[in-house]
Image (tube, rainbow, N blue to C red):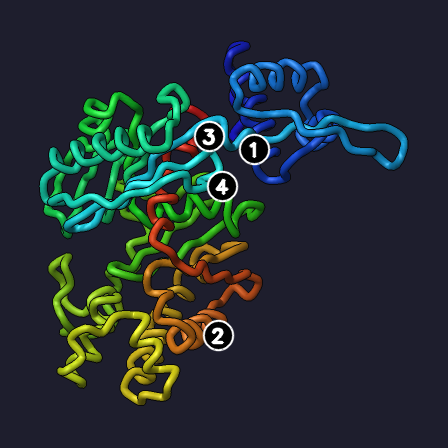
């Protein structure tokens, strides 16, 4: 955490974040152990914890024996004390998920929306919030905010979508549009960044000093977190690894260029490659293609193995550049199963110049992206204010 100089309020903010992030990483902890780990004085721990207990952000757990000599009350995050809404936006619908402070799902819904219209997206998000809050019976006072995860490049601090080729957006103040209709703070970021934040806060990267995420599905992207901070780049375009050119004069990508990795090995591209060889397979999906590969279908095996090696090489490039402690592979593409994942991970490990990276595969479900979006709001609890 950066060293800051400021007034007493700044000191309280820093102390609060030290305590909250210690509990997030290590779970229930006695006050004395927090003081020893963070360097805060017992008086500072007492003041900050009292304030957080009053706000129902933390709670006290039953006392436990300490070496058989005494019993110590432990502090813990009160995950159920607040809620957040996460929204994953796709071309024709959105997935909205109400979560607690730990991104545990409370309720979820899917709503049709034309993603080409920012106003329609804002209205659909506000409506989803109302419906989920009413269905769950949650108090609006406990809502900390709304996170929107979507493709593209974003100015996350200002809440502006700078560019989204898939939806035709440019310089859209989407966070302000949502906040104005929903009556709650809103954040927007690239969906892979949102996924990375969730893994950093509560997933495989919870205790890692540096975390890389490589996601493949409808699109392909990567994200990097170092010392708790997302590396977004100057214009929010860091991690756009899906637009590396891998096939000269290959198929046209949605970005307009030819031969991008995303145009060759995204989920739609893989399925289309199988349909071109087996034209009767119009209803093929990732799970059924994985099943065919498991049964030994030579076309399915070759297509998935080739895609896996290409994706593994791209992931290895990203890992070699940033040398992360932990790398998480996720996205809808993991549904292709071992026929793709095994050559992908093998190629990643073979080609990664940095040999110490620990690799995890996050097996996907429908709420994963929306939980990541909720983390955009929840992250405010564990980060310095802008």
The location of residue 77, given as percent across then percent down, is 57, 30
**Residue density around tag 1, few if under 14, some if 14–19, many if 20 or more, within 10 Å:** some
Q: Nearer the viewer, residue 225 or 47?
A: 47
In this view of the protein, can residue 96 be seen by the observer?
Answer: yes
Residue pictured at 38% horizontal, 48% vertical: 195
Q: Which residue is tagged 3?
A: 383
- Residue 112 sits in which quadrant? top left
For the residues marked 1 and 2, what is the alpha-carbon distance in whole angstroms? Answer: 35 Å
For the residues marked 4 and 1, what is the alpha-carbon distance in whole angstroms? Answer: 9 Å
Q: Of the two numbered discs 2 and 4 on the same chain, state the one appearing first in sequence.
A: 4
Q: Nearer the viewer, residue 266 or 222?
A: 266
Residue pictured at 32% horizontal, 36% vertical: 147
The location of residue 198, given as percent across then percent down, is 43, 44
For the residues marked 2 and 4, what is the alpha-carbon distance in whole angstroms? Answer: 29 Å
Viewport quadrant of the C terminus: top left
Residue pictured at 32% horizontal, 33% vertical: 135
Q: Which residue is tagged 2?
A: 350
Q: Of the two numbered discs 4 and 3 on the same chain, state the one appearing first in sequence.
A: 4
Query: Disc 2 or disc 4, which is closer to the eye?
Result: 4
The relative height of residue 226 versus residue 173 in the rendered view (above or below) is: below
User: Would residue 154 be found to the left or right of residue 344 on screen?
Assistant: left
Q: Of the two numbered discs 3 and 1 on the same chain, state the one appearing first in sequence.
A: 1
Considering the numbered disc 4 on the image, is that residue within a helix, a strand or a loop?
helix
Q: On residue 201, which mark appears?
A: 4
User: Would residue 276 be found to the left or right of residue 151 on screen?
Assistant: left
Q: Of the two numbered discs 1 and 2 on the same chain, state the one appearing first in sequence.
A: 1
Considering the numbered disc 2 on the image, is that residue within a helix, a strand or a loop?
helix
The location of residue 284, given as percent across then percent down, is 22, 74
Q: Which residue is tagged 1?
A: 21
**Residue density around tag 2, few if under 14, some if 14–19, many if 20 or more, within 10 Å:** some
């Amino acid at each position: 955490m950066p060293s800051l100089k400021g007034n007493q309020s700044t000191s309280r903010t820093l102390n609060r974040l030290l305590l909250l992030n210690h509990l997030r990483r290590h779970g229930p902890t006695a006050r004395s152990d927090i003081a020893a780990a963070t360097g805060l004085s017992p008086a500072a721990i007492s003041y900050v914890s009292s304030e957080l207990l009053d706000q129902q952000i933390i709670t006290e757990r039953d006392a436990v024996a300490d070496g058989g000599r005494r019993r110590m009350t432990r502090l813990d995050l009160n995950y159920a004390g607040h809620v957040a809404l996460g929204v994953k936006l796709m071309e024709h619908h959105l997935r909205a998920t109400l979560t607690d402070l730990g991104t545990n799902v409370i309720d979820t819904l899917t709503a049709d929306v034309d993603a080409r219209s920012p106003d329609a997206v804002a209205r659909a998000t506000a409506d989803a919030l109302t419906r989920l809050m009413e269905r769950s019976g949650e108090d609006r006072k406990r809502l900390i905010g709304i996170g929107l995860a979507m493709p593209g490049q974003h100015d996350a601090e200002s809440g502006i979508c700078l560019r989204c080729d898939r939806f035709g957006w440019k310089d859209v103040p989407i966070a302000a549009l949502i906040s104005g209709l929903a009556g709650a703070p809103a954040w927007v970021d690239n969906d892979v960044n949102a996924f990375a934040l969730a893994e950093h806060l509560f997933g495989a990267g919870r205790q890692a000093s540096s975390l890389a995420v490589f996601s493949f599905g409808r699109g392909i992207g990567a994200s990097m977190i170092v010392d708790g901070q997302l590396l977004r780049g100057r214009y929010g375009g860091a991690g756009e690894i899906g637009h590396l050119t891998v096939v000269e004069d290959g198929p046209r990508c949605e970005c307009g260029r030819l031969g991008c990795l995303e145009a060759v090995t995204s989920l739609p591209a893989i399925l289309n490659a199988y349909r071109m060889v087996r034209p009767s397979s119009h209803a093929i999906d990732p799970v059924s293609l994985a099943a065919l590969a498991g049964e030994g279908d030579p076309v399915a095996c070759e297509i998935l193995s080739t895609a896996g090696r290409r994706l593994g090489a791209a992931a290895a490039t990203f890992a070699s550049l940033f040398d992360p402690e932990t790398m998480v592979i996720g996205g809808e593409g993991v549904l292709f199963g071992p026929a793709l994942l095994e050559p992908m991970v093998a190629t990643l490990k073979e080609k990664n110049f940095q040999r110490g990276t620990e690799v995890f595969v996050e097996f996907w479900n429908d709420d994963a992206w929306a939980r990541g979006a909720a983390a955009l709001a929840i992250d405010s609890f564990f980060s310095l204010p802008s």
